[in-house]
Structure formats: structure tokens, C-alpha cells
Amino acid sequence: MQNVFVYGTLRAGEVNDISSAAARHDIAAPTLLGTATVKGRLYDFGAYPGLVVDEHGVSVTGDVYAIDDALVAVLDEIEEVYPGVEGLFRGRDVTVEVDGAAVPCRFYPVAKEAVPGLKEITSGDWVAHRRAR
């Protein structure tokens, strides 16, 4: 088991809902540990967001799940993260706080070079932003 922080289309009810992704691949359902934030800047790519990590940014809202190790490969495929390839999303590690406890997580930020000209989501919440469009 490991943990993942999801801030965009992998969140519950979104197009790539992490629980649905697990079910499609006959992998144990992820367990929601809680909500957390990562400091950064969130950008609107149209159908999905991208998070650029930035200690001077806003608190970007996401959910933290404990997941079966087999689900990591599925998430990597959704985010198009491949070994040795620097694509739009990058599989990285971050530590977030959930209910006062530090939780190490995998997450999928984007490179800051990918966002020039894109609208910043200043609320830091993809789901609220998408619903308001």
C-alpha cells in the first residue's frame, strides 16, 4: 500500500475518478484518508488541471488515498507518466498533512514550462472551478 494526493480529474466524481479506475482494473478500492493541500499554482488545461509546485502559491486542494501498489501503474497510465520520459505530468513525492499527521504521497504535478498562457485557478480547487465554468 502507498498513498496518493489527487487534485484534479482523479478526484471522486471526476472523469478519471480514482475509485472507478481501480474498479475497471479489478484492483482493490482506494481508501480515502482525507483532504489536504499542496502549495502551488493550479492551471486550467481545459479538460483537466495542472499543478505547478510553488511554495509562494495558493493552497491547492486535493484528496489523499491509500492505494494498492498495483493502482500506481494505472494512475501513471492515466497521467501518461513513463519511465525515462519527461511528459506533461511527472510522478513525484510530496508530504501532506491529513488530520494533523504527515502523510507521504505520490502526486502528479506539471512542469512550469507547460503553463504559459493558461488561466490560473486562483481558488486552488479544480472541482469548484470546473463546476463554476
Image: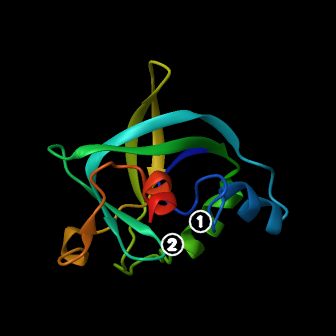
Task: Identify the residue at image location x=43%, y=62%.
Answer: 91
Question: What percent of the width, then of the height, locates residue 58?
Answer: 24, 44
Task: Identify the residue at image location x=48%, y=62%.
Answer: 130
Query: Looking at the picture, does residue 44 appear above or below residue 124?
Result: below
Of residues 11 and 67, the one drawn nearer to the viewer in this rendering? 11
Question: What percent of the width, then of the height, locates residue 81?
Answer: 47, 74
Task: Identify the residue at image location x=48%, y=76%.
Answer: 47
Q: Amino acid at mark 1?
A: Leu
Tell me how far mark 1 sits from mark 2, CA to CA.
Answer: 6 Å
**Image quadrant where one finds the N terminus:** top right
Question: What percent of the width, then of the height, locates residue 17?
Answer: 66, 60
* SS category of the residue bearing label 1: helix
Question: What percent of the width, then of the height, locates residue 67?
Answer: 67, 47
Residue identified by numbered label 2: 79
**Residue 89: quarter of image:** bottom left
Q: Amino acid at mark 2?
A: Glu
Task: Identify the residue at image location x=55%, y=41%.
Answer: 64
Query: Looking at the picture, does residue 30 appear above or below residue 13?
Result: above
**Image quadrant where one finds the C terminus:** bottom left
Whether residue 97 is visible, yes or no, is yes
Residue identified by numbered label 1: 75
Q: Residue furthest top?
A: 100
Asked if disc 1 and disc 2 are in contact, CB closer than 8 Å, the reply is yes
Query: Looking at the picture, does residue 119 appear above or below residue 28?
Result: below
Q: Residue furthest left?
A: 56
**Residue 113: quarter of image:** bottom left
Of residues 23 and 57, the one drawn nearer to the viewer in this rendering? 57
